[in-house]
Image (cartoon, rainbow, N blue to C red):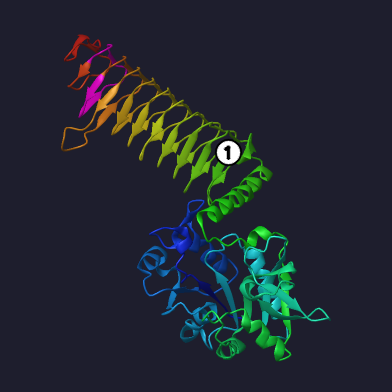
Amino acid sequence: MKISTIILAAGQGTRMVSALPKVLHKLNGRELVRYSIETARSVGSDKPVLIVSPNAELIRATVGEQALYAVQEKQLGTANAVMAAQPLLEGKADLVLVINADMPLLTASTLAALIETQKSNPGPLTMAIIISDNPRGFGRVIRSGDGKVQRIVEEAQATHEQLKIHELNVGAYCFSGAWLWNALKEIKLSPRGEYYLTDIVEIAGKAGESIASITLDDEDEAMGINNRKHLAEAEAVMHRRINEKWMLAGVTMLDPNLVYIEEGVKIGRDTLLMPNTYLRGNVQVGEGCRIGPNTIIENSSIGNNCSLLASVIEGAIVEDGVSMGPFCHLRKGAHLRKGVHMGNFGEVKDSTLGPGTKMGHFSYIGNAEIGENVNIGAGTITCNFDGVHKNPTVIGDDVFIGSDTMLVAPVKIGKGAKTGAGAVVREDVADGDVVVGVPAHSIRKKKQT
């Protein structure tokens, strides 16, 4: 059975008070519209049709080929928006889902339930409802005496008695593809000058058709985002969902309200996430780690049994048993091999520190290859930029770099060599040599055999 999805994204979003289209505002690091697209695809839908306004260049540029596009030329209501998809979908889908791009909390299990219910429904549509004391502007579900759905009354048109109804229309539907398009043509213009998709329920009811419904257990799924207050409320729900999932998978959080994990992050069991930890983008954290407090990790891989305190890690690889912080910064291309220790206020960029290497505090390492068991004294700097090029520094195994050493790249330090405190090294240093001074000069050569 072929399933297609229409995602309504043509609203102006004026209550966001933003130059950015509402559906491009981010929830937990991803644009709102991406949630609807990915949820639809996860239940077996074809590439969804995104209904957009004529000036939707930013949306098209962001979503790209993840969706097809249909333009709602004028803002004439939700039914008019769905009609814009007719040329793309008529005769091509057995079932048509209709959802809103500003409802990112709607889950795949809900869409799957809509689909399965409609498959067994002899009538043309299945709708999602919630029972709630908080109407959130939703239409009220009107039922007949025998409990059948008859119609939906929009809140603006509801009577005083109808406003007391707690059964609310979520705005997510599954339609028979063969029935939908002709039914849309029967919808009349509302007193507000719009064609309401909700009126299609009354059309089915008057025709004696069976209107099926599913009731959501979690009313948070129905949360629509119309302003930044709603966005913050949805953010809190998303964080709770994600953190609960990870805690049940063996991750400890001292205060889940102060841990922020984006979708797609992977975390090993027995890892402890301290308050104010942020895991963003493509992040993998191994088992038995202690992360935070006050640590940000973005697009990085962390091994097992690492301790990362109050640090920022971006585009880096951290192998097993690494300890660092507080106040360290790993920038893009940093690679700390097994057992590296990095002291406070250190920074590494586009460099590899070999196994067992210890990097003192207040040091900067850039564009460097550093061997095993190297001691990098406090205040060491690789002077890698000459104003035009970034130049490399290569340090061999078992080297001792004294405090406040300046390594003026390009430069190589041989295995077992040492630099004295405050040395400015402008020339290569041979294996086992000891250099001191400004500029650095040798005071002991390795014995020749």
Q: Is residue 435 left or right of residue 357?
A: left
- Residue 439, located in which quarter of the rendered image? top left
Q: Which residue is mark 1?
A: 258
Q: Nearer the viewer, residue 301 or 28?
A: 28
Tell me if residue 50 can be seen.
Answer: yes
Q: Nearer the viewer, residue 412 or 17?
A: 17
Q: Is residue 430 magenta?
A: no
Q: Is residue 379 left or right of residue 21?
A: left
Q: Is residue 409 magenta?
A: yes
Vertical arrangement, residue 448 with respect to residue 386, above or below: above
How far from the left and from the top, in percent, is residue 396?
31, 24
Region of the chain picked out in magenta, as a range: 406-423
Q: Is residue 209 left or right of residue 19?
A: right
How far from the left and from the top, in percent, is residue 410?
20, 29
Residue at the (55%, 51%) spot, across then down: 232
Check disc 1 and give the amino acid type. Leu
